[in-house]
Image: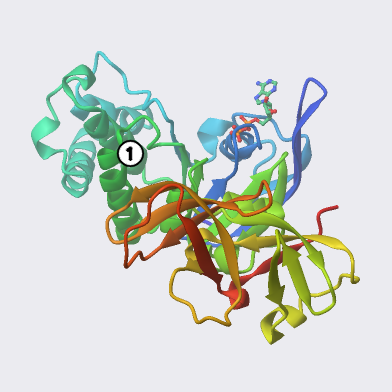
Amino acid sequence: MARVILQNVKHVFNNVVAITDISLDIPDGEFWVLVGPSGCGKSTILRTIAGLETTNFGKIYIGDKLMNDIPARKRDVSMVFQNYALYPHMTVRQNLAFGLRMRGVKHHLIQERIAIVAQSLVLEGLLERKPKQLSGGQQQRVALGRAIARQPKVFLLDEPLSNLDTKLRDNTRHELKELHRSIGITTIYVTHSQVEAMTLADKIVVLQGGKIQQVGTPQTIYNQPANRIVATFIGNPPMNILHGTYTGEGFNVAGNFLPIISEIQQKLNFNPGQTIDLGIRPEHLTLNYEDNDPSLLGEVKVVETLGRETFVRLGLTGSNIIINAIITANRNINPGDLLRLGVDLSKLFLFDPH
Ligand code: ADP
C-alpha cells in the first residue's frame, strides 16, 4: 500500500496537450475516482501513474519514491482495463497465477494466494474454466482477482464496469467497494459515470479539458461545486441552468420572481441588471409549497414515473427554457398540464455566464 503524489504533471501527445497542471495527493489506502467526459484526460493520468506513458513534465511519487524513470513493471501497481485483457488460452487459475509466476513466487504460495483471492471474489467454482466459458461479470471478477493476487501497492482501474449490463454493473460496483474495504489498497478508478464516482469514491477528481476542476468528497462536489462544469456534470438528471436577470432584490426568470434569501446573499457579487445563470437541481423542485413560496410556472412536456418519485420536464411559460424536476407526485400529472413547481432557494447556485 502507498500514498500516490502527482506534482504539476503534464502530458503532450504530438503537440496535443492531453493533461496539464495535474497535482494530486492521494493518501495511502483511499479510493479516489477520476471522472469527466470522454477525452478529458482520465486515462492519460492513470497511464502516467502506471508508467505506460513517460512523464517528461512534473513528478510522480508512489510511496516516497520518485517514479518518473522507473519502468511500468517495477512500479508495483496493478491495472485493470475495460476489456479485462485475460489470457484466453489459460484457465482462470492460470490467469490468476500468471503475474505471480512471472515474479518467481513459489508454486505452493501461488496456490495459497489464489485460494484467498478466489474466495473473496467468489471464483472458487470457476478456477478450471477458460475465459470464454465465463459471463462478462465473471471475467471482470477474474481480471480484478488477477490484479489483487499480485498484492500491488496501488490498484488502477480504467472504466472496469463499462462492458457490463446495468444490473451486473451495480452488483460488481458494490462488490468492488466491499473488496476495497477488506483489502484497503490505494485505488485510483477512472470512469465517465458520475453515479460510479458518487458511490465509490472517498474523493472525486472532476476533470475537463485535461485540467482538474475540483477535488473533493462526493458530498462536497454535490453541495459545493467549484464551478458550472462540476455543477452540471455531477447529478442525475443534471442541474438545470436558467438564465435570469438580477434586479437587486431577486431574480427574474421567464416571468417568475425568485427573491433573495440570506443563504444566497453571501454568494452575490453581481450588479443589478446583470444576466446570471441560476443552477437548480431537479430534486430541489417540488409540488409541495406554500402560496407565497417562490415557484416556476410551465407546461408539462414529459412525465415519467420512476417508482417512488416522478420525473417531469417542464417548458417555462413565455420562454424557451426547459427544466427537469424530480418530484413526489401526490396527484396525476399529464403532458400539456400547466404546473407550478416550488423552488428551494436555499439550494440555489449562482454562476456568472461569462
Ligand atoms: P479520457 O480517458 O478522459 O477519455 P484520454 O486520457 O484518453 O481521455 O485522452 C485525453 C486527450 O489526449 C484526448 O484529447 C485524446 O484524444 C488525446 N490522446 C489520448 N491518447 C492519445 C495518443 N496515443 N495519441 C494522441 N492523442 C492522444
Foreground: 249 or 346? 249
Residue 354: x percent and y percent?
86, 52
- Number of numbered discs present? 1
- When the figure is inspected, residue 231 is found, relative to residue 303, above or below; the finding is below
Foreground: 315 or 157? 315
The colouring scheme, among rainbow, by chain, secondary structure or one colour, is rainbow
Q: State whether residue 187 appears in this view.
A: no
Dot 1 crowding, Cα within 10 Å, few <14, some 14–19, many 20+: many
For this orientation, the residue located farthest to the left is: 125
- Residue kind at label 1, given as amino acid type: Leu
Tell me the residue at 56%/47% (across/down): 34
Question: Residue beneath label 1, please?
Answer: 144
Tell me the residue at 62%/54% (across/down): 317
Tell me the residue at 85%/77% (across/down): 248
- Image quadrant of ligand 1 equals top right
Tell me the residue at 16%/38% (across/down): 123
Residue 2: x percent and y percent?
51, 56
